Amino acid sequence: MNPSGGANGIKNSLMRRRVNALRQKISGCFRSKEGAKIFCRVRSYLTTCRKQGMTATEALLLLFQGKNPDFMVVDQDKGI
């Protein structure tokens, strides 16, 4: 059993790997470990938003406005 959603999950996983490899290929490499972490974090955010039915534009607008998408629950007590 594939927990990531069967054939579509596998296809999406391969696509993410291709995007990351393409990103490295275009620039030659990530310039720093921190840059690689930032890229992965943004990519993860956009992928999650897309799975929740948002466009990348909508997701980035919320991000730059300092707002969370409706599906992200923030626990004020834990600061998460």
Image (cartoon, helix red, strand yellow):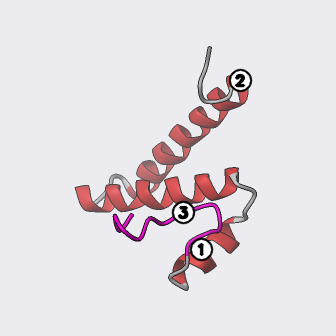
Vertical arrangement, residue 62 with respect to residue 2, above or below: below
Q: Quadrant of residue 7?
A: top right
The amino acid pointed to by label 2 is: Ala
Horizontal and vertical percent position of residue 45: 53, 59
**Upstream in the sequence, badge 2 or badge 3?**
2
For disc 1, the marked residue is: 60
Element assignment for label 3:
loop
Q: Can residue 32 be seen in this view?
A: no
Is 51 on the left or on the right of 33, as rendered?
right
Element assignment for label 1:
helix
Element assignment for label 2:
helix
The C terminus sits in image quarter: bottom left
**Upstream in the sequence, badge 2 or badge 1?**
2
Q: Is residue 19 visible?
A: yes
The N terminus sits in image quarter: top right
Residue at the spot 64% in from the left edge and 37% down from the top edge: 12
Magenta stretch, main secondary structure class: loop
Horizontal and vertical percent position of residue 51: 68, 50
| Circles 2 and 1: CB atoms closer than 8 Å | no
| Mark 1 surroundings: few (<14), some (14-19) or many (≥20) residues within 10 A | some
Vertical arrangement, residue 18 with respect to residue 33, above or below: above
Q: Which mark's residue is nearer the viewer, 1 or 3?
A: 3
For residue 73, the mark is 3
Mark 1 to mark 3 CA distance (whole Å): 18 Å
Residue at the spot 41% in from the left edge and 71% down from the top edge: 76
Q: Nearer the viewer, residue 21 or 80?
A: 80
The boundaries of the magenta stretch are: 68-80
In the rendered image, residue 77 lying in the magenta stretch gets the answer yes
Residue at the spot 53% in from the left edge and 82% down from the top edge: 64
**Upstream in the sequence, badge 1 or badge 3?**
1
Horizontal and vertical percent position of residue 2: 61, 19
For disc 2, the marked residue is: 7
